Image (cartoon, helix red, strand yellow):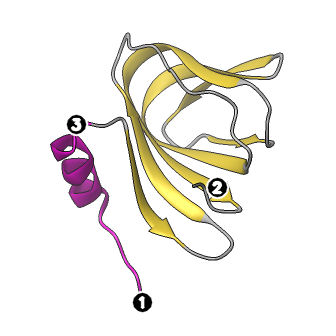
Amino acid sequence: MKAFRLDELEAERAANDGAYLQFLKERNMSVGLYALDAGQTDPQQPHAQDEVYFVVSGHASVTVGTETTAVGRGSVVYVPAKVPHKFHHISEDLRVLVVFSPPEG
């Protein structure tokens, strides 16, 4: 069994000075923790994989393709492969679990 604690993942991500920490990679998927602080710009580019975002904490807007919606704790967003997407108007530090399928990198 592989089990994770969000507080430990956040500490590991912060210790590595990165916005993203991949903590699980399997044959058909990978999972990571993505962090953007309030007011920060989201630098990501479209990915070759489908993604699902689960917002653990924070508030922002997300644009996927031409559609925009507000997200907060408990929001789930699907992003098809190769579709441009960005978080923006981040009003509260954002912590998001990201599932890639197939696995990223």
Q: Nearer the viewer, residue 77 or 104?
A: 104
Q: Nearer the viewer, residue 61 or 33?
A: 33
Of labels 1 and 2, the one closer to you: 2
Please tell me in which quadrant of the rendered image residue 82 appears: top right
**CA separation, marks 1 and 2?**
20 Å
At label 1, which amino acid type do we have? Met
Residue 1, numbered label? 1
At label 2, which amino acid type do we have? Phe
Residue occupied by mark 3: 17
- Judge from the rendering whether residue 1 lies leftward or rightward of residue 83; answer left or right: left
Are the two marked residues, 2 and 3, in contact with CB atoms closer than 8 angstroms? no
| Comes first in the chain, label 1 or label 2 | 1
| Comes first in the chain, label 2 or label 3 | 3
**CA separation, marks 2 and 3?**
22 Å
- The residue stretch that appears in magenta: 1-17
Local crowd size for mark 1, using a 10 Å CA cut-off: few (<14), some (14–19), many (≥20): few
